[in-house]
Amino acid sequence: MADGLRKGLTSYGDAGFSLFLRKAFIKAMGYSDDALNRPIVGITNTYSDYNPCHGNVPQIIEAVKRGVMLSGAMPMVFPTISIAESFAYPTSMYLRNLMAMDTEEMIRAQPMDAVVVIGGCDKTLPAQIMAAVSADLPTVVIPVGPMVVGHHKGEVLGACTDCRRLWGKYRAGEIDDVEIEAVNGRLAPSVGTCMVMGTASTMACITEALGLSLPMSATIPAPHAERFRSAEASGRVAAAMAMAKGPKPSELLTAASFKNAQVVLQAIGGSTNGLIHLTAIANRTQYRIDLEAFDRLGREVPVLIDLKPSGEHYMEHFHHAGGVPKLMAQLGDLIDLDARTITGASLRDVVAGAEEVPGQDAIRPRDQPIKPEGAMAVLHGNLAPRGAVIKHSAASPKLLQHTGRAVVFESVEDMTLRVDDPLLDVNADDVLVLRNAGPKGAPGMPEAGYLPIPKKLARGGVKDMVRISDARMSGTAFGTIVLHITPESAVGGPLALVKNGDMIRLDVAKRSIDLLVDAAELDKRRKALALPATPEWARRGYAHLFNETILQADEGCDFDFMRAKGK
């Protein structure tokens, strides 16, 4: 039987009085005894005027409440932190763990038998799932859904792949001030998350593959009526879970489900951020993400979703083609179909219900992929002893084996000041290097890995260069870009030893990234290296906690004390 209002009574030394007081105060809201005696489904409210990705959350909440009440349970909405990618200083990743802690503690602190978490913008779904795993209460995840596409001069636009592409054209002088302003008003024509395979869409697909959300929930466009019908159905499922006291995340997140998530991550041309978030989620369970195994999967799993930035289509096309259920059907034996979902059904049942859409080309058959290998490769070498990542499905093939001269930027600020300097010594064959942009060094590992092409080269027609950093990159970005170099330079990683003019060799086929400097010279540089002192910003509050306990990218950038015991 559900605990309802009796769960987690405030400690006054008298349990009867605690319940009496709780009921007395909540009745001030106008609730009846009938309502208060029912199982409770908590619903997170992540709406914010700063978060256009979550602009449809109020309607989603109303639909969830309807589903909960139609099933005989009591919905209780509560607020948590809301993080919007382009509004969070210094970066949304800096705040992900804070949102995870906030959400976890509010789930624990307030009486509820099940919880519905609603999120979408890049770091919100990961934060909420991290929280749900740690709280281990029956949880339904609802993604807010992607925007619909925009249009400009007869061309379909997708935020934010086309944000970057068209801004690049503007930097190169191919678009004037008037046109870039027109584009600015057309890139995001509705509320919702980016309608390309950025981090938000990636995490929504991963969530569905993990069995934590309803089938098709990853891809339904944010403004569509179907989004709200799915939310109502999610409310019904949450009510049933509240009454049954399960299944809990610990029952659904198994070795098989985590492997399924990795297969889907590779097959959708997913964001590199997805790997960090999935690692953080897994580290809160008894499982972990093995980067070597993930790379091996990438050699077996083709990219089947023809979506920007790896392909041509957008999320609404993926949805109308059959969504994640159809993708998993096409993946065949690469998916463990016995994995369970929140409804009690298995992925086998989900796949059996996948829609067949004649003529669609957004979801390719396994023998006709858009890329023969998965989205991402894991690199190692003397520059990245614990690994680095490249999204080679969105890179220039001719640059996947490349040796070039290092052009080093000491920080994001240094890059901003110098990258467009006409006197910068740089050519198209060089390798742009950014350091001190990792979890501690930046802080928060910003999406600065998409180093801009120096303006003098962009205006000469250069569209891509090899770029390497300890930063992250938006999943919406295209380019031959090596990210998450671990350990980061701020903690003494080899990236801190690179000098202007050093030669760097990238060989994706061999999964290697190396600094072509002999070991004796590197040892000499290492001995002379002085690590930065604790900065002023990191001496109090959340910033202090972050600086003292943040893990590296290969461990998911969670706080070291938040991992499951034994990690």
Image (cartoon, rainbow, N blue to C red):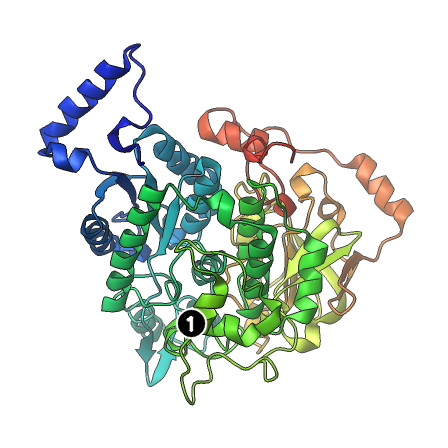
* Percent coordinates x, y for residue 279 in the rendering: 58, 48
Q: Which residue is mark 1?
A: 323
* Percent coordinates x, y for residue 465 in the rendering: 64, 69
Which of the pair 164/99 is nearer the observer? 99
Q: Secondary structure at mark 1?
A: helix
Can residue 354 be seen in the rendering of this structure?
Answer: yes
Relative to 562, 120 lies left or right: left
Can residue 95 be seen in the rendering of this structure?
Answer: no
Which picture quadrant has residue 191?
bottom left
Which picture quadrant has residue 13?
top left
Relative to 546, 551 lies left or right: right
Which of the pair 554/458 is nearer the observer? 554
Compared to residue 6, the image places residue 498 above or below, namely below
* Percent coordinates x, y for residue 282 in the rendering: 57, 46
Which of the pair 212/340 is nearer the observer? 340
Which picture quadrant has residue 400?
bottom right
Give the residue displayed 36% in from the left and 74% down from the top: 316
Relative to 186, 89 lies left or right: right
Give the residue displayed 34% in from the left and 62% down from the top: 145
